[in-house]
Image: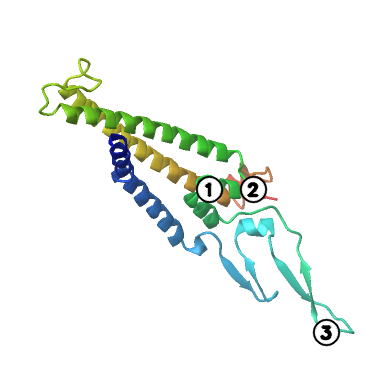
Amino acid sequence: MSVKNELVRRFHFLFGDVARRYCIAFILMISCISAMPTHCFAQATPDTTLNNIVDDTVHQRKAGQGIRVITPQANPGNDTTSMIQVKKGPFQPNPKKAGLYSALIPGLGQLYNHNYWKVPVVYVGIGVAGYFFITNLDSYQGYRKAYIGRINNPYPTDKYVGQYSIDQLQQLQNDYNKYLDLTVMFSTIGYALQVIDAVVSAHLKNFDISRDISMHVTPVATQNKLGMGLVMNFK
């Protein structure tokens, strides 16, 4: 019966205040990602010459994904238009999808972005957070049980008899309660960071960092004037 009561007590503790904090953080993160407007990620402008919607995002234009050009061609036998499929460019992930995937399952957004090396890093962090959570929880419950057992009990039988006084047990209980709260807080921060990483990585997936883009200072000569100018080259 005592083992059953202990399991029930641990269940209520695990799904009590600590679990509520995780749930609140998770719900807030999902709500923020879902509330982000679509135009934050891409802007579509109509192209009347092609009679089609062409994505105006720089990355999408560079990637050239899914852009179909409609050109009318004269055909004596059939008066229809032919469709020319533009060659598909590199993979460009959707930042909103990446953030949502990471919010639902940590590491899934990084997998969607094809950043495979980040997935083990995410789960190593989850393992470390789980280790400290379980360790601090067990210590907190042990000291708390011993402290409660010594209240108004002149003959305590806990394993800390002769090692800690009742005041020391109370202090240790409070300390590990604080460590448990810090573990939850840092775990929530880590969870939020991996969601943010998925969104930012999706935005910068095809960001141009080649040497064709340069900026330098050069002398500029104008009529009756001589000065310095800032020159940017885009090739």
The residue under label 2 is which amino acid type? Asp
Q: Which of the pair 150/19 is nearer the observer?
A: 150
Mark 2 residue crowding within 10 angstroms, few (<14) / some (14–19) / many (20+): few
Task: Choose top left, top right, bottom left or bottom right for residue 189.
Answer: top left
The residue under label 3 is which amino acid type? Asp
Q: Which of the pair 70/199 is nearer the observer?
A: 199
**Nearer to us: label 3 or label 1:** 1
SS for tag 3? loop
User: How far apart are the alpha carbons under marks 3 and 2?
Assistant: 42 Å
Outermost residue toward the front in this view: 1
Mark nearer the N terminus (3 vs 1): 3
Residue 64 pos. (x, y %)? 69, 59
Q: Which residue is mark 2?
A: 208
Left or right, 82 with respect to 213, comes to: right
SS for tag 2? loop
Residue 204 pos. (x, y %)? 58, 49
Q: Which residue is mark 1?
A: 198
Q: Which residue is mark 3?
A: 79
SS for tag 1? helix
Residue 190 vertical position relative to residue 76 in the rendered view, above or below: above
Mark nearer the N terminus (3 vs 2): 3
User: How far apart are the alpha carbons under marks 3 and 1?
Assistant: 47 Å
User: How far apart are the alpha carbons under marks 2 and 1?
Assistant: 18 Å
Task: Choose top left, top right, bottom left or bottom right for residue 183.
Answer: top left
Residue appearing at x 53%, y 59% in the figure: 41
Answer whether residue 23 is visible to the viewer in this image.
yes
